[in-house]
Amino acid sequence: MDTSIGSIINTTLANVKINSNWAVDTNNMRVLVVGDIGRAALFDCSMGGFDATLQKGQKIINYKKMPNHKWPQVQMWFWAHVINKDSSDYVHSVQFLDDENVFVTATSSGEVKLWASLECISLGTLNSSDWNYKRIESYVTKT
C-alpha cells in the first residue's frame, strides 16, 4: 500500500492514523481523510481563510479568535468503507473531482464511492444496488 500521499499527523492541524489517504477540496476548504480500513472524517482546513459568517450555507467560525486551534471536524469519524481488520482489502485512494465537486474513495476490492464535498454525504456506491445516477446528476447540477 502506498501511503506516500499522506497522513496528517501534525498535532497542530489534525490527528489521524498513519495509514490514511486524503484529498483536498480547495473550493470549499475541506480535507477528507480515510484510513486504510475505511474510517473517515471531514475537516475544515480554511485556517482563517474565510472571514464571512456564512459560506455556501455553512457557518464558518472566525479562527482568528481561536489561538492554537486544530482543523475543526465538519463530519465526525464515520465508516466510509467497512473493511474487516483481518481482510487483505484496504482503502487505497481518495480523490477530489473539482468539476463535479465530489470526493471519490476506492478500495483494493474495487468498491468506489462518491461523496458530497461540503458535508461528506454519500452519493452512492458505483455498480451496486444503491447506485442512482440521477442522484449524482442532481447533485452535480446543483453545485
Image: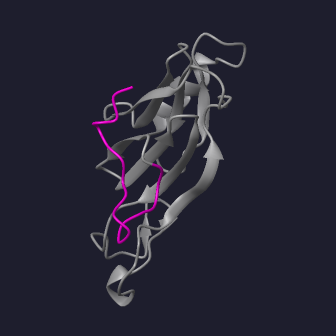
**Which residue appears at 41% of the width and 67% of the height?**
71
The quadrant of the picture occupied by the C terminus is top left
Residue at the top extreme, as displayed:
127
- Identify the image's colour scheme: rainbow, by chain, secondary structure or one colour: one colour
Q: x, y percentage for residue 25?
A: 34, 46
**Which residue appears at 39% of the width and 86% of the height?**
66
The part of the chain drawn in magenta is 1-17
Residue at the right extreme, as displayed:
129
Q: For residue 48, what is the image quadrant?
A: bottom left
Question: Is 112 left or right of 63, judged from the image as shown?
Answer: right
Q: In the rendered image of this protein, does residue 125 appear above or below residue 6?
A: above
The quadrant of the picture occupied by the N terminus is top left
How many numbered dots are placed on residues in this image? Answer: 0
Question: Is 3 left or right of 88, judged from the image as shown?
Answer: left
Q: x, y percentage for residue 63?
A: 36, 80
Residue at the front extreme, as displayed:
86
Residue in the foreground of this view, choosing between 59 and 5: 5
Residue in the foreground of this view, choosing between 9 and 125: 9
Residue in the foreground of this view, choosing between 50 and 68: 68
Q: Is residue 51 magenta?
A: no
Question: Is 129 left or right of 72, judged from the image as shown?
Answer: right
Question: Is 60 left or right of 68, judged from the image as shown?
Answer: right
Q: x, y percentage for residue 128?
A: 66, 13
**Which residue appears at 51% of the width and 62% of the height?**
73
**Which residue appears at 28% of the width and 36% of the height?**
4
Q: x, y percentage for residue 13?
A: 36, 66
Q: In the rendered image of this protein, does residue 59 appear above or below residue 17?
A: below
Q: Is residue 8 magenta?
A: yes
Q: In the rendered image of this protein, does residue 111 appear above or below residue 90?
A: above
